Amino acid sequence: MFRRTALAAAAVLAAGALLLSACSGGGTASPTASGTPDPSASVTIRLVAEPGNLDIRQTAGSSLDQILIDNVYQGLVARTPEQDIVPSLASDWKVSSDGLTYSFTLREGVTFQDGQPLTPQDVVWSLTTRKNTPAWSDSARLSRVSTIAADGQTITLTLSEPDSSLLWNLTGRAGLILKENDTVDYKTAANGTGPYSLTAWKQGDSITFARYDGYWGPKAPVAQVVFAYIPDNQAALNGALAGEIDVVTGFDANLKSQIEAGGNFSLVVGASTDKGTLAMNSTKAPLSDKRVRQAIRQAIDHDAIIQALGSGQTLYGPIPELDPGYEDLTGVAPYDPAAAKKLLADAGASEITLTLTIPSFYGTTIPQILVSDLDAVGITLKVNAVEFPTWINDVYVNKNYDLSFVLHTEARDFENWANPDYYFTYDNPEVQALYQQSLGATDEAQAADLLAQAAKIVSDDAAADWLYNGSSVVAVGTNITGMPSVNVNERLNLAELAKSNG
């Protein structure tokens, strides 16, 4: 399974999800609309990759998390775009000093979008079922939870051992609360407790949300949100300029002047945890030789990638700056074609031909740069652009690839490097041990330090190459407020989205 994954199949074109500069803060503020918000307004948001179905219980891909979590489905706790953990269906919580007991106060008066009440039993059932159903995404994230019980409105989770990631996990799929014995067809519909209900899905075209007037919190300021799935950036630009689209996510920063020319849009930039990851299958020769993998890393001009895309910042390890455990690892694999050639010679690797398997919606910018850079050191790179379901089957499931590129959008996903069964094929017991120690830490600083140690080993091992740390690049209509600008490829909380008439 993808876990909460991470895979930007559900997110953006490679050329459109990057930072405009090397900054890594919260991003540019959204424009301020001058008109009065219209409560009957409909907002159309361009997204790139459409989900195959809507079953967030057991269908992988961040395209579901991006639109359904926060807007339709909720958990006891939630996360802000800046990665802070905040109350949601629980009004508050407390954690015992030994890190083994988590107590949540469930809000009263909450209803699902079909009108059924949320009960403490729904919470116990949801979390218990998630934990005990391996087919459900992220079930393993509750593996250290030994009991889940309700006493009135108090929900108590008791752990067998400390888990520093538990609260964070509860902000994702592992913590989503569903209605027990619900009859909804999760593949085509949804029923949650969030501010919007899912009202229509025109496959191959759009998904529509409507404001849920029975929502327990502040009502959504707009009546409707339409997610229009338009993979091509030029087509999205044309739609925006024609007045058919209000917000363009996954936008190409190089098109800034074109979309801002008429004064109806502003390009908004926010930080993200997107990681443009060049996976290397270390179970196959010649990539089983660390020197070959290191040579590939040092053959790639990361700064040139940023320049060509018009945005972004470099990343030389598996943890981005927004996540705990980040460390600047630039010195591990600096751009040095001469050093790359020597590494290949030392490895006795000559006349190497490798294949890059990449989802076709990422376009040609990244492949072209990789082909050129690797050719310069004597490696022939063939590009195999495939439909995403093919990538899932061949790369993710069967691990049948040499090199692969995907934009992993998920925050705090280092565990993939501690999982030898993940498609990365990386297997290092020391990294696995450090990750487990990090989970067991009850001090946040200690947990982050252990992650940093593990990430340094992963980078030193040349387990992959991280071509860039992307960010959110969003073109926002000047009559739109409340549009998120940070980590929008991962989550798109639209609770404050508003549209004015002027």
Image: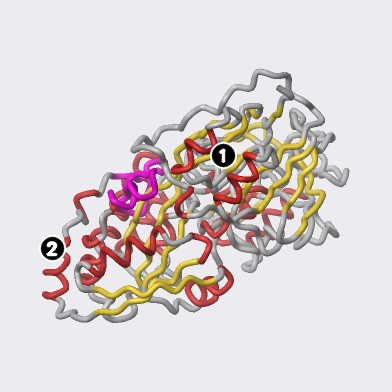
Residue 440 image label: none
Q: What amino acid is at disc 2?
A: Ala
User: Residue 481: x and y, percent?
Assistant: 63, 27
CA neighbours of label 1 inside 10 A, class few (<14), some (14 to 19), many (20+): many
Judge by depth and name the residue closer to the eye, 445 or 37. Answer: 37
Judge by depth and name the residue closer to the eye, 302 or 442. Answer: 302
The structure residue drawn at horizontal position 39% and vertical position 49%, both measured from the top left corner, is 309
Q: Earlier in the sequence, mark 2 or mark 1?
A: 1
Residue 68 relative to residue 144: left or right: right
Residue marked by disc 2: 339
Residue 423 relative to residue 339: left or right: right
Q: Is residue 94 visible?
A: no
User: Residue 94: x and y, percent?
Assistant: 57, 35
Question: Is residue 62 covered in magenta?
Answer: no
Q: What amino acid is at disc 1?
A: Arg
Q: CA distance from mark 2 to mark 1?
A: 43 Å
User: Residue 93: x and y, percent?
Assistant: 61, 35
Residue marked by disc 1: 79
Q: Nearer the viewer, mark 2 or mark 1?
A: 2
Quadrant in the rendering for residue 242: top right
The structure residue drawn at horizontal position 65% and vertical position 58%, both measured from the top left corner, is 50
Question: Is residue 320 covered in magenta?
Answer: yes
Give the residues drawn in magenta, as a range: 303-327
The structure residue drawn at horizontal position 60% and vertical position 48%, both measured from the top left corner, is 236
The structure residue drawn at horizontal position 65% and vertical position 53%, both measured from the top left corner, is 229
CA neighbours of label 2 inside 10 A, class few (<14), some (14 to 19), many (20+): some
